[in-house]
Image: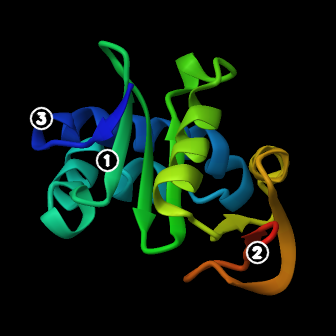
Amino acid sequence: MIRKAILDDVSRIAEILVFVKRIKFRPIFQDDDYSFNTLQVLKVAKEYSKPEILNNIYVYDDGIVKGLIHIEGKEIKELYVDHFFQDQGIGSSLIEFAKKEFDVDFLWAIEKNTDALRFYEAHGFYLSDIKKFEEGTTEYLVMMKRKGK
């Protein structure tokens, strides 16, 4: 079931974000200081407990919070599924929820995260010609737009 995140979910949300970001992004950015000093579960939990963030997060919860989607306006800001529960349709459920309930029409993805790009393309998004640097890095973010929007 997909539901609005609550304060009790914050530690699980932080755990998912930290570990998936380490697994997916450390090979791209190769920044151990960020991955293991800045990216800490307690720090992320504190940040995500702020109402302006938490109020825009929805979780996939079937008794265990297994994934999350962060939506602001028509943008998907983040979509993460716990590494142990990937390839079970959870990300698909979350993105389809966002399309149906919020009519989302764009997102930014790391250009080198080809798994994510393929996933979003499979769910009706395409690469636009718009890109920008991920702040503080030499890596590009690419804007993906929803077909027909």
The mark found on residue 40 in the picture is 1
Residue for point 47% across, 36% down: 19
Q: Picture quarter containing residue 16?
A: top left
Along the line of sight, the residue nearer the viewer: 112 or 94:
94
- Upstream in sequence: badge 1 or badge 2: 1
Left or right relative to 32: residue 129: right
Identify which residue is drawn at 84% across, 53% down.
Answer: 121
Check disc 2: other Cα within 10 Å, few if <14, some if 14-19, many if 20+: many
Which percent across, then down, holds residue 70? 42, 56
Q: Position of residue 141 (x, y in %)?
A: 71, 74
User: Relative to the observer, which residue lies in front, 110 or 76?
Assistant: 76
* Label 2 element class: strand
**Up/down of 75 relative to 19, above or below:** below
Tell me the residue that label 3 is attached to. 8
The answer to whether residue 66 of the structure is visible from this angle is yes
- Quadrant where the C terminus sits is bottom right
Q: Residue at x 69, y 21 (%)?
A: 87
The mark lying in front, picked from 1 and 3, is 3
Q: Please report whichever mark, 1 or 3, sits nearer to the chain's N-terminal start.
A: 3
Three-letter code, disc 2: Val
Please state if 138 lies on the left or on the right of 102 as rendered: right
Q: Nearer the viewer, residue 40 or 54?
A: 54
Say the numbered circle drawn on residue 51: none
Classed neighbour count for the residue bearing mark 3: other residues with Cα under 10 Å, few (<14), some (14–19), many (≥20): few
- From what the image shows, is residue 65 above or below residue 132? above
Measured from the top left, where is residue 118 in percent x and y? 85, 47
User: Mark 1: few, some, or many residues within 10 Å (few <14, many ≥20)?
Assistant: some
Residue that numbered label 2 is attached to: 142
Residue type for callout 1: Gln
Query: Along the horizontal axis of the image, is 10 left or right of 89?
Result: left
- Res. 32 in view: no
Give the position of the N terminus as an image quadrant: top left
